[in-house]
Amino acid sequence: MTKHHALLEGMRVLDLTDEKGLFCGKVLGDFGADVIKIEKPGGDPARNIGPFYKDIPDPEKSLFWFATNTSKRGITLNIETPDGQELFRRLAKMADVVVESFEPGYMDCLGLGYADLKSIKPDIIFTSITPFGQTGPYAHYQATDLVGAAMGGMARILGDLGRPPVRMGADPQSYFHAGLQGALGSMMAYYHREMTGVGQHVDVSMQDAVELTLMNAVEIFEILKANLVGLGQFFVSVRPQAGPLFTRTVVPCKDGYVTLMFGGGAFAGSSQSSRALVDWANTEGYVLEMKDYDFPTMWDNATLTQQESDTYNSYIAKFLMTKTKVELYEEAVKRGILLAPCATFEDVLQNAQLEARGFWETVEHPELGESIRYPGAPVKMKETPWKIQRRAPLIGEHNEEVYEEELGLFKEQVAILKANGVI
């Protein structure tokens, strides 16, 4: 039987990040890298981010920590002490990648910056994840996830029309996007090093990473001079002559919401879908006002008024309120209607497609006496499969394994380092 190896098997990563960069190490670890999460003695402050397992505030029960630190080993180390710095240098000699999220210059001040580590490990890859990158007028500015979303432009295009900008839910999207780009940059640098033998400094800006999520918002302003704003339930057609046309795409139904593309004109798929939806509604006595409406020829996006669009959509809205999400989705599949349910997390966990693809990963938490289900593989790779290697580490869980077995320290030395607050 052929043995399958993980994609990044053989790569060792030292993870010094806080919540801004934790996702980077998780991605690398889940793809097979040996990621060692380095925390301050006593534990990383990110462990205090809730919610917590069974609502028990405890640094060992943070669900945020669980989610962002899978597949990592964990050690404690105070890199602000001389002994801690020497231990880190020894670890760096055995590593391929160092990931950090301190303010630019902090690691240099400790003698652990890229130039310092390069002198002892010439091909080291040093990945820095910061709010605004290593250079520029904002380089030393501090920023939370909300600041990243706001200054990256994401917040302004979220939220409901006519209301102030909002952030995307409770999860730190700016941190996750920065972490994902950090993982991508680290992998590309690692590949480059394998080809050339040359390491490099990977500089990740949270603001830059967020900018990449805006799709065509930048081009719309550049070409049409139109600022996209929070549209919430709407899709906007930017029309320089007639003005923007707002079409409601998230609409309520009997037990929740569905997303729907309703319209016509040059969009053949939309015309066919809308015709099919009207025909279905007609069989139940709804939307009779559009029984003979010819979507390809009568629906002109260039001249349609907002009032006309709202009126047509109001007819459909009455019909949708008579059906559940499941009823609408099942019939949409049969009739070729561009409609999908807005799934709750309960819906997602019960989704037949995700279940069929084996998406969910069950991870053992022996210290809790149970298993927890996690989101699984972002991609399927037959020859180099993705896998959550282990649950997030406990505080200092692998100190003995790393310091004694891998660095060769004696138990007495480890005990002294612990007593002195180094580990």
Image: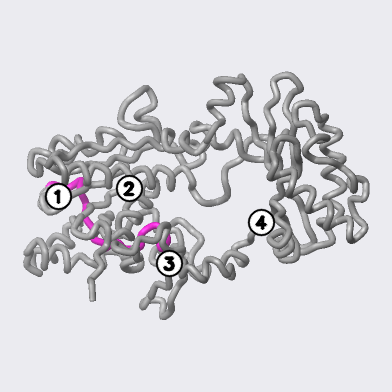
SS at circle 2: helix
User: Spatial distance from mark 4 to mark 3, Cα to Cα?
Assistant: 30 Å
Number of other residues with Cα within 10 Å of mark 1, as a class: few under 14, some 14 to 19, many 20 or more:
many
Q: Which residue is the site of mark 2?
A: 183
- Where's the C terminus, which quadrant? bottom left
Residue 405 visible? The answer is: yes
Which of the marked residues, 4 or 3, is nearer the chain's N terminus? 3
Task: Return the x and y of residue 111 as percentages of the image width and height.
Answer: 15, 38
Q: Tell me the residue at 36%/47% (across/down).
A: 21
Residue 35 visible? The answer is: no
User: Spatial distance from mark 4 to mark 2, Cα to Cα?
Assistant: 30 Å
Q: Are marks 4 and 1 in contact (CB under 8 Å)?
A: no
Q: Nearer the viewer, mark 4 or mark 3?
A: 4
Q: Which residues are magenta?
A: 66-83
Which of the marked residues, 2 or 1, is nearer the chain's N terminus? 1
Instruction: Give the residue type at disc 3.
Output: Lys
Q: Which residue is the site of mark 1?
A: 92
Which of the marked residues, 1 or 3, is nearer the chain's N terminus? 3
SS at circle 4: loop
User: Spatial distance from mark 2 to mark 1, Cα to Cα?
Assistant: 18 Å
Q: Which residue is the site of mark 3?
A: 61
Task: Return the x and y of residue 251 as percentages of the image width and height.
Answer: 75, 50
Task: Return the x and y of residue 186 as percentages of the image width and height.
Answer: 27, 45
